[in-house]
Amino acid sequence: MVARASILTETGLRVPGSMARSGTETGPEPERTGVLRFAGFELDFSRYELRRDRVPVALEPRTFDLIALLARNRGRTVTRDEIFREIWPGRFVSDAALSSQVRAARKALGDDGTRQGIIATVHGRGFRLRNGADGDAAAHAAGRDAEPATLAEAARPCIVILPCAGLGGDERGRLIAEGFTEDLINALSRNRWMSVITRSAAFALGRSGEELGSILARLDADYAVTGSVRHAGGRVRISVHLIEAVQQRCIWSERFDRELHDIFDLQEEIADLVSARIASELGLAEQQKAARMSPRKLGAWELYQLGSAEFYRFSGESNHRCQELMRQAIMRAPDFAEPYARLAYAMVLDSVYFEGPTDAAHLDEALRLAERGAALDDQEANTFFALGRVRLARGECDLAIDALETAIALNPGHALSHCGLGDSLVADGRAEAAVPSFERALALSPQDPFRWAFMSYRSLAHVLLDDPEAAVYWARSATLVPNAHYWARANLIAWLVAAGDVEAARSNVPALLRVRPGFTVDFARSRLFFLRDPAQRDILLDGLRRAGVP
């Protein structure tokens, strides 16, 4: 391997080459103004903008600088030292910072570290923008002849699950650790909105002794999962950490203690729980990343993430902003499946919770969007989840249950689908069968933004099972979640009446009216259009009436 010409400090930080030795001759440099074109892209130096087919591509300023440096030296390997000197002049930075910018540049160009159709890695030296990058072959490699969804897919976060360490030198603990790692890779791979590094690459580099930053750089990964397993007697402790690549900081960690009965059941259970929680954390991290970008440079992936952030704020205004952002994402990338699913579900929630349209035309449009999302990606749980929720709003319980069972088969760790299935089973008159679905949803995602709905929907199941005390418990729990909708309070009022505590029910009415002035029994009846069983609707309306709701 060619020795690196830069200096590595004891802390692992690189001293830029210009501070370590005299500069490398790079030849004359083109004027840094005007427009430079390659592979269907334009670098506009006067506007500091990258465009693809005249549409701005979302990227940060330093990523622009890196692409510009490579483009001005197209066909020539730009050494790592040159990049450090040009992009971070006079600064001490780590290899991880460069790796992060290379990943961002590849994503902006529709490339990745596996394909390297535009930006090639020259191991031990640096990076090169391929000479053919202004020709048809490179345009094909960058996805130019594909639908715009290619860029959205390239922007998906990439994660590597490194082998868990079996601590204590126990052979059984080592086997549990290895099996858990494999199960976690399989579980996370069911989340098709993220890219998961294969087991072979993860295990090979994870056991190589290389530092984490180097592993992330070689794999072009945005996040890493590390962990350990301790086994003592009949107990197992599994610790898991989620680390982002740029600063190598831990953004989530958790410990799981379990009795060891069946090793396979243990591995599968913890892998599903960890997968669900990592998916939630990554979703939040991607939303925050999109929020930091300039609005005029947002791509389809970033628009989808911003819309998702609005979606989880759970208000009428944020729901409408979500719908608009999803429509923008669809216009930008017509074959990107997730925005169709999110938009369809947002339209249903608008009807149920935010006083939006409830007419057939509105629900027909939601159905078309959900079906389009499922057709675009029939292996993504989110698309079938949305389809199931639309079906339930239309009163099609059997079709809703079919779609949600399909979603769970695709991704058993998808908490929303378990909740949706429970809700559909309740609507279908199968309350007892619904309770385990709600339990599973909460176990998978105890801090889910929609956990108030997990609890509130479950409360109706207990009312139908003639267990009003449990119904009150879950309805009250739902009202304590910060973003809970006012319907959680309405449910609590009705179930307190069912439990015989009319006084407590009446004491909750002012809180309901503060959040939703003008709430009446007639209004409630108009928003319960999705309940096809009159008995379920009447239980709720009667409770509200007896509590003194106008």
Image: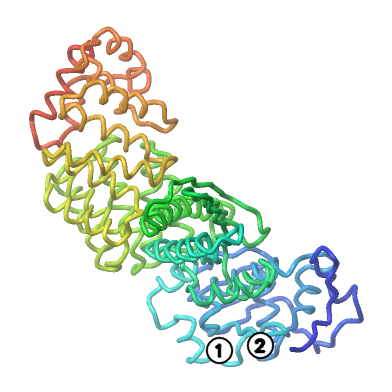
Q: Is residue 209 visible?
A: yes
**Contact, mark 1 vs mark 2 (Cβ under 8 Å):** yes
Residue that badge 1 annotates: 134
Of 239 and 371, nearer the camera is 239
- Mark 2: amino acid: Arg
Q: What residue type is labelled 1?
A: Asp
- Secondary structure at badge 2 equals loop
Closer-to-camera residue (528/172): 172
Residue beneath label 2, please? Answer: 74
Position of residue 402 measured from the top left corner of the image (x, y, whole percent)? 16, 55
Side of 386 relative to 539 (left or right): right
Residue 536 placement, left or right of 197: left
**Relative vertical location of residue 356 with respect to residue 191 in this rendering, above or below:** above
Q: Can residue 294 be seen in this view?
A: no
Q: In which quarter of the image is the C terminus?
A: top left
Question: x%, y% of residue 467?
Answer: 20, 24
